[in-house]
Image (spheres, grey):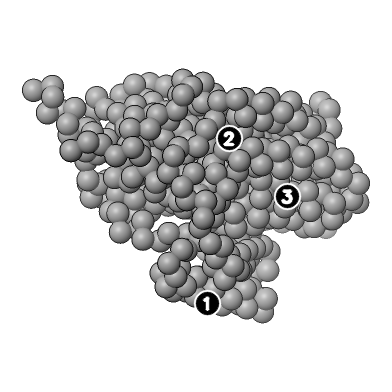
């Protein structure tokens, strides 16, 4: 039987030229998810906003980004992938210029919303184009390049953002997108093309109800994840209402998408076992990746006293390790069983998290760099085979829809990881402080000794009453520092357990068909 035209289609241009083109856009977009974090204090001061108000610069981007992600498959089918990609790059680049020119906080938030809409569809569309441009047996190498953008960019974001903000201005973290965006538009217009089955699908109807339910579900959930800790989670009335609204909209969205003939998001793709397992593992990986990226600089700055830029430098080896490892992993895909690469990756990820769980206040920078390098290697060994295996059982026509959902769960997993870190650090520190404060008693010999030493030192600089008060403050400050340290330790340990929990799911993957045929041919 002859193969279908859909399976025979190949782009006219070299797939690697297409990869370079779309990866310029991907790296630019993913870098912007984290590059603004470190510049928030500067943005707040420049635009006369409070630090709490300035966080809407991040939240607005995440909300609009989340809403557009699962719609990517429908947008690509309705308008054509090339047209959507070009529109996204143009919108993202224009919004970046508007961000740099922003004269007040509302203008910046509106520009970030536009940036999120443009960037949200850009990454899954680029991933779909890359997967379709290569034959199945070469997709591992393509996903290795894709991983270099998706994994390395958020790690490098704080370092790049800190350097630009310190040496120039926070506005330049947005202006640097302009030359990259313009070049990406020109290249995409030249080399990207739509496969024949995309051209045939432009008659699809618009699912307005599905879009409305999707927007309400994801917007309310993202705001709760981002702002919940500030509002004491369910202790705030608005959080309870937003959570209820999100759950109801989510259930209504699922019911509606299965009911209609032309859904906005084709949820039937979840019947594919590899895809469903891959989404669960990607959510866990993203939670660990973004949670560690948020937590480690916080530890270095608040407890170790590192400046922001030095904290970024301490983490940058993770991005360097991930960058070079993905090139090696791309060559191993197809030669080594995917599940063994994934198992190695999750074991290494757990090991790096357990190493970080051994931190204390006397560690040197190398004690942070070494686990970070292992972490970067582990993420590369997971991301490339995980993406390849997740998409391996899908037809080309399903890839656009699946890529949108896959990247949505990557973003939501990251939001969950960051929300977990901020909540557990605050509440874990309180819990440890409550446990340790009982030791600050005159009946405790260790406390009496430390208190006496502190008081004797301070007596040389103040009267007895003042020295006593300052000694109590010094001891309490040490207690508070230790309580926060234990909260960091607990979080890293839990990340290690979460990484180990992913290993049993790896063995539920079906082996990709093209790998079976390759193995059979070699015998």
Of 11 and 37, the residue lying toward us: 11
User: In the drawing, does residue 328 fall left or right of residue 486?
Assistant: left
> What residue sits 71% from the left and 55% below the top?
60
User: In the drawing, does residue 296 fall left or right of residue 475?
Assistant: left
Q: Which residue is mark 3?
A: 114
Q: In the image, is residue 277 above or below residue 514?
A: below
Residue 482 locus on image (x, y percent) = 58, 50
Q: In the image, is residue 38 above or below residue 421?
A: above
User: In the drawing, does residue 144 fall left or right of residue 438?
Assistant: left
Check disc 2 and report its element: helix, strand or loop: helix
User: What mark, if any, has residue 248 been given in the picture?
Assistant: 1
* Labels 1 and 3: the sequence-earlier one: 3
> What residue sits 71% from the left and 42% below the top?
91
Distance, label 1 to label 3, CA atoms, is: 27 Å
Label pair 2/1, CB-CB below 8 angstroms: no
* Labels 2 and 1: the sequence-earlier one: 2
The part of the image, by quadrant, that contains residue 440 is bottom right
Looking at the rendering, in which quadrant would you find the C terminus? top left
Q: Residues within 10 Å of mark 2 (few under 14, many from 20)?
A: many
Check disc 1 and report its element: helix, strand or loop: helix
Of 43 and 32, the residue lying toward us: 32
Q: Which residue is mark 2?
A: 26
> What residue sits 42% from the left and 22% below the top?
327
The part of the image, by quadrant, that contains residue 241 is bottom right
Residue 15 locus on image (x, y percent) = 45, 24
Check disc 3 and report its element: helix, strand or loop: helix
Q: Is residue 160 visible?
A: no
Q: In the image, is residue 350 above or below residue 249?
A: above
Distance, label 2 to label 1, CA atoms, is: 33 Å
> What residue sits 28% from the left and 53% below the top?
273
């Amino acid at each position: 039987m002859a193969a279908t035209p859909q399976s025979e289609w190949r782009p006219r241009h070299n797939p690697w030229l297409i990869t370079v083109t779309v990866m310029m856009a991907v790296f630019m977009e993913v870098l912007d998810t984290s590059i603004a974090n470190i510049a928030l204090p500067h943005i707040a001061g420049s635009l006369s906003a409070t630090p709490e108000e300035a966080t809407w610069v991040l939240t607005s981007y995440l909300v609009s980004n989340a809403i557009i992600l699962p719609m990517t498959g429908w947008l690509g089918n309705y308008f054509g992938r090339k047209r959507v990609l070009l529109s996204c790059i143009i919108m993202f680049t224009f919004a970046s210029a508007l961000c740099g020119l922003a004269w007040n906080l509302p203008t910046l938030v509106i520009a970030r919303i536009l940036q999120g809409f443009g960037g949200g569809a850009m990454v899954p569309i680029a991933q779909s184009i890359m997967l379709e441009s290569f034959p199945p047996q070469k997709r591992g190498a393509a996903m290795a390049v894709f991983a270099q953008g998706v994994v390395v960019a958020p790690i490098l974001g704080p370092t790049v953002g800190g350097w630009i903000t310190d040496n120039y201005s926070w506005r330049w973290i947005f202006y640097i997108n302009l030359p990259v965006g313009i070049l990406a538009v020109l290249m995409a217009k030249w080399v990207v093309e739509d496969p024949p089955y995309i051209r045939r699908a432009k008659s699809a109807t618009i699912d307005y109800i599905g879009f409305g339910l999707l927007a309400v579900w994801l917007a309310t959930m993202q705001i709760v994840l981002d702002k919940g800790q500030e509002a004491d989670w369910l202790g705030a009335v608005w959080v309870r209402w937003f959570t209820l609204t999100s759950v109801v909209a989510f259930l209504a969205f699922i019911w509606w998408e299965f009911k209609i003939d032309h859904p906005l998001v084709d949820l039937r793709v979840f019947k594919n076992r590899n895809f469903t397992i891959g989404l669960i593992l990607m959510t866990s990986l993203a939670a660990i990746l973004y949670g560690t990226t948020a937590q480690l600089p916080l530890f270095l700055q608040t407890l170790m006293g590192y400046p922001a830029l030095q904290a970024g430098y301490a983490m940058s080896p993770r991005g360097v390790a991930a960058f070079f490892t993905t090139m090696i992993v791309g060559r191993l895909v197809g030669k080594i069983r995917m599940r063994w690469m994934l198992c190695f990756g999750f074991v290494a990820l757990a090991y790096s998290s357990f190493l970080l769980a051994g931190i204390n206040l006397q560690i040197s920078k190398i004690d942070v760099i070494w686990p970070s390098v292992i972490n970067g290697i582990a993420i590369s060994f997971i991301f490339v085979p995980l993406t390849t295996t997740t998409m391996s059982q899908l037809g080309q026509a399903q890839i656009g829809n699946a890529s949108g959902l896959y990247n949505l769960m990557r973003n939501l997993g990251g939001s969950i990881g960051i929300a977990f870190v901020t909540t557990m650090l605050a509440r874990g520190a309180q819990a440890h402080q409550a446990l340790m404060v009982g030791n600050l008693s005159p009946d405790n010999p260790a406390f009496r000794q430390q208190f006496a030493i502190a008081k004797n030192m301070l007596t040389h600089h103040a009267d007895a009453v003042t020295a006593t008060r300052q000694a109590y403050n010094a001891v309490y400050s040490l207690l508070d520092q230790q309580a926060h340290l234990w909260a960091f330790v607990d979080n890293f340990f839990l990340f290690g357990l979460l990484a180990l929990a992913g290993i049993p799911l790896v063995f539920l993957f079906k082996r990709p068909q093209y790998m079976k045929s390759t193995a059979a041919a070699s015998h």
